[in-house]
Every structure is written in C-alpha cells, then in structure tokens.
Amino acid sequence: MNLSARTIIFFPFRFEMKIRRVPEKCYGCRSCELACSFHHQGSFAPGGGSIRAFKNHETGAIHWQRDNTCDLCAGEERPFCVRFCSYQALEVLNE
Amino acid sequence: MNKNRLKIDKVGGGLAGKILRVDLTREKIWTEDTEKYARDWIGGRAVNSWLLLQEMEPRMKWSDPENPLIFGAGALVGTLAPGACRLSIDTKNVFSGGKGSANVGGHFAPEMKYAGFDHLVITGKAERPVYLFLQGGQAEIRDARPIWGRTVFETEEWLEKEFAPRRVRIAAIGPAGENRVKGSGVVVDRAKVAGGSGVGCVMGDKRLKAIVACGQGGSVRVANPERFFRAVEEALRKVRESPLTEMMRKTTLAGRWGDPDSPNWDFLISARNGQDDHWAREKRIRLANPETGYPRYRRSISACFMCPAGCMPFSEVKEGKFQGTKGEGFWSNTVMGAVRLDITDSAGMLKAWILANDLGLDTDFANSVCAFAFECYEKGILTREETGGLPLEWGNVDSLIALLKKIAYREGIGDLLANGSKEAAQKLGQGAEKLAVHVKGQDSIEPFRVPKGWALGVATSPVAGRHLRGTTIGGARFGPKTASFSADTYEDQEKYCVWQSLTKEMEDTLGVCVYVGTWSGTYALEPSDYAELLNGAFGTDLSEEDLFFQARRSYNLEKAFNTLHTGFDRKDDYPPRRFLEDPVRSGRYEGEKCDLEKWDEMLDRFYELHEWDKATGLQTKRLLEKLDLAEVARMLEEKGKLIP
C-alpha cells in the first residue's frame, strides 16, 4: 500500500466516482481534511488538500467544501477522507 | 519495571519543531528547538511541567512577571491520531501556590503546531493590553486595546474579522481573566475552557488578551507513515467497537443523566454546596429527562479536532424566559453545578453556562463559589443588602446569572467571591470557613462522601481539588481488575487511582482526549495504542511499559513542584472538613461520611503504590533515582524535603 503521494496509479473508473458527504452524520472533526492533505502533501497540513471543513458558531452547522484538486486519492485503495472518517459521513458513489 | 532511562535518540516526526519564548515586559521574542525536550519528556504537559520546575523559583508568586505561562500541544497533536487535540496550560496555581495546570480541546492546539510551535513560554507583563499572533514559525505582539474589555465571543468575532479570509484559531480570556478573577479560564472555540488553577487569571495579569494561531502553510510530518496509519486504523477500530461510542454520539456524556436511576446520581453529585449527596428523583427528571429537561434543547453534536467520539452539544432554547439562548454547552459538569445550586431549570442553567464561557469563567469554580455564597445567604452570613439585593436562594437561576456577572466584573459581592471561597470565608467569618469547600485553596465541586476513589483522586490531585488526576468510579475497560471493586468502599481504590493518574499523564503528554482514552467517555484506547501511535509519529520503538515509566517521571515533577513551592505533604491530602463531619442527609447513602481511619489506611496504600514516604507523603531519593530524576532529587534535598 502506497501512503505517499508520489506514485500515481491510473484507475480509469475513478473518474466516474464521486464523494458525497451526509451532513447529518458529519461531526466536523476534520479528519477528512487532514487525511486529504496527507495524500496531497505527504504530511498533515490542513487546507493543503482538497477539503475544508469548518463550523458555524451561530448555528452549530458544519460546512464542508471539496475543490477540483481532488483526484479521489489516485494510487490509493480508497480515498483517504472516506477511509479515515469515523462517522461514516462520507460515501463513495459510483455513477 | 527494570528500565531506568527513557531512550529517545532522535525524534523523526510529530513535532512542529520550535518552542516560542515571549517576554511581554521587554517585548522580546525568540525560539528554541523542541527536540531536546521531546527526547526527555515527549511533549504536552510533561514538557510544560519540566520547564516550569526548572525555570520558576519557589519564592515567585503567581502575579510576579517572571511566572511563566506555558502552553503545550501534545506530541500527537496535529497528526491524524484519534482524539489528539489537547492543549495543556501550565503556570503557578493562583489558589494553591503549587502546580497550576489546565487542559483544553477544540481546534486551537493543532493550529498552534501548524503555525510552527509545540510550546509557548510567556513571561513578563505587557504595559498595555496585547495579543499574540502566530504564523509560519513567526510571532508578533499586537495591540489588544480594541478588544480589551470585550467578552470572549466578541473577542473571537473581532479577531476572526481582523484576519479574514485567513482561517485562525483563538485562545482568549474574557472580562473575568482581565479582572484577575482567580477562577478564570482560557477559552478556545467559544465553548471549551482550560479551567482550573486560574490560568486565565495569570493571562489577564500579563495583559495578554488572546493568542491567535494561523496554521496556513504549516504542516506536521510523521516519521513512519506506514506504522502510524496502521496504528490509527487499529485505534479507530477500537473506537468503533466500543459499546459506549454510540451513546456518546447520540446524547453526549451528559446524556447519561437522562435516566433518573443512573448510578451517576449516586456517585457524582453533591447538592446544596455539599449539604447532601442525594438529589430528589423529581428534580433529576425536571433537569435532565429527555422530555422535560435540557436534552430538549439539543440541536446537534460536534467533535473536537480529530475526535472520533464527538461529545459537544449545540443547544438552542426556542421558547420561554430564556428564549434565544444558544451555543455549545451542557456537560456532566453542568449537571454537577446545577445540583450543587439546587437548580432544576435546564434552560436557565444552559444560559448560565454559556454566559460563564462568554465571561471567561471556569464553570466548576463559578458553580462552586456561587453555591458557597448561596449557603452563606441561607445561614444568614450574607444578607440581601450585602448581595446587592440578590436573593441567593437555592434553585434561583436568575440570581446565579446575575452573580456570575458580578464575579466576572468584580462588582459588589462579586469582588469578594472572585478570589474563591477560602479567602471569602476568612473575610466573612461567622463559621463560613466550614462552608468553603476547597482543596488546597481551590474551590471544588466534587463529591467526597460516597465515591471513595473519586475523593482520593481529588484530595491528592497535584493541581488541587480537581477530578482529572486519578479519580475513578470504576468502569475502565483496561487497567487494574479486582473482583471486589465497588465505588463506595475503600478497598482497591488506590490501585485505580494511581493507574488512572498515570494514564491521564500519558494522555496529556500526547494530547489525546481522555474521552477516547482511559477515562469515562468511550474507554476505547489504551496505553498500548498510545505507544504504537507515538512510535509511528516519532519513529521510536517504545513500549507500553516505557510510557508508564515516563508517566511516573512526569507525575513526580508535579509532586516535586508542589513540595518545593508550597510545602504540601500528607496533611494536605484529606477531604474538606465538611465531608469528614457532616453525613449524607438522605437517599441510598444516608449517614455516609468520610471515615478518617479508613481514609488514612487508603492514603497509606496510595503512597506505597507511588513509592512515596508514608509518614510524610514526600518523595524518596530511591524513587527519584529509579526514575532518572537525580536533578529533581537534588532540588528537594537542598530544601530538606527529600526522604533519604
């Protein structure tokens, strides 16, 4: 299993996959954001990947964004954000 | 244990790399490498304890500019280690004069590491109010006059706007800290408070309003990613499989109180300032029942950074007198506080809790000192004239809310209470001393008469009267197992208490929250998990035994600090007078009180397990040499406080 971002294996079907967050299951722990940054940077650097998560202090709601730098963790068995989400709040959808 | 040295030759990851030093008097900033401290002490509270012991002379008072205020993120903070988010703040305890230490979660500690710093050591006093800004391994002292006087929420909002669109995390004090209320805390993410020991009071005394960390561009590496990720997955599996995780997620810890027959009501409460350790069933239902109490207001639950459990409720009151109250809060401690004041109005209690956070008060202190005032009022020691017209009657939540403001701003009666019940009682006289429930000078909200191991942990806590250093009512999935253990007997309590104080030491060193660890919460992770996570991050090969050895070392640093700075010994490790004299008035444990003879025997066994001298409670030369603490032994010997 390759844990660094250096080796990229091409999985054609990944382009038909999507990651979806189930808001009611998300607790805002930012594990997805940190795991994602590791895929991109080889170190833990929040904001250094494709995902950003933050909480609205007025409403308690968790806001979550994924930008277009996401490559669905090319080279990895499963996207890191999904793999390390403790709340099963992220789902991989095959379309 | 045959080891006598911790061997870490190189730290290959896990750290931000630098310790920031700030002298606020001279406005000087410099840094040093973290690694040499991490090799000896790993991180978090253990490094803080060592720095404090080394750099603070016993003659110094908490209000001396030289008193260092030390922030330390745990060794695993900033990585993907489950529950690794904790910050330890250490300084001289404003109540006891001994070790001061408070711990907080949220998202600040990791941001501090991404901004480049594992620890901050702040000395001096600023001439005018300031805040610190950290980013990219650089620090800046900035003018805080625009936010001095503002509440915590206002301060966070102002600073967030100031730095937008950059994402920042803030540790701030409120008016309570500014006004040097002894029981004030440092607040993170608006709702999480490093309470206890008066860390907010020391920060206010230094005229340091806030620390703002921006981790943009920063990162934390791990030395052995394969090993680290394996350890993370194993830890997450344990959290998933813990039977308590689902409960935490559904209801938070406070959810355990929803059942009026839960054993919590027998073991964890003390009513009306400790007059009784039983609270009527109908009151339990009114406060905590899902249909009638605070769970009605819960809108959602969220998690701290990297936490796989999730225990922070966001609540909102949509009707009644307290309509519009919203924010994070209502924990087990809120229930303990409500019972102490005999309050059953859960919306009002939520309002009081959120207000205390906004004012920057340590809520355990606030509820405890207010309960003292309520009882003084009941006994006629305080009159309505003296309270500024406030009827401090049991159950009156409006009076509590008004009193919190008076304390934070030191208005009227609040000024008397702001220094804690011990000092207030000395001024009031008329028998008020017995009503002041404190341990080593710090107000305590804890029950003592029924749960013996809980009481032992609180009475012997190095940070004076708090429940996060060894308290137990059993239930841990790991650790000592004895067939006869029961929370209400004196047998075997010391075994759990010592084990729990060492695992907490580990948790604070690594920065992992006890709620995913060995205390309360999910009981998911155990010391072997900590060793493996640390090995992956640091690139070491430490065992669970190594971590226990290390925990004993750093636990003994706090003990030594107290001996050097205060002269605490065996005589200071007893419950407050009230619990030795007055029995429980009603309920299952009616008639129960602390038994001095049995307490003494339990204390003997506790010291024996710690390998401290039974007669005095002091450390021995043999132990400190075994723990590779010759330097500490020398310091104690010089003062004549080391048992040969």
Image (tube, helix red, strand yellow):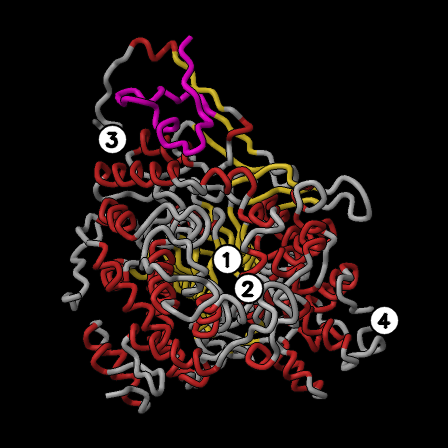
Q: Earlier in the sequence, mark 2 or mark 4?
A: 2
Query: Which residue type does callout 2 highlight?
Result: Leu
What chain does badge 3 belong to?
A
- Which mark is on residue B143? none
C-alpha gap between disc 2 and disc 3: 41 Å
Query: Which residue type does callout 1 highlight?
Result: Leu
- Height in image: B414 above or below B138? below
Task: For marks 4 and 3, give the one nearer the viewer.
Answer: 4
Query: Which residue type does callout 4 highlight?
Result: Gly
**Residue indicated by mark 1:** B132
**Residue indicated by mark 2:** B208
Q: Residue at x 57, y 54 (%)?
A: B332
Quarter holding the N terminus of chain B is bottom left
**Residue indicated by mark 3:** A4
Viewer-nearest residue: B353 or B289: B289
Hey, which residue is sitting farthest bottom in the picture?
B640
- Which mark is on residue B389? 4
Disc 1, disc 2: CB below 8 Å?
A: yes
Quarter holding the C terminus of chain B is bottom left
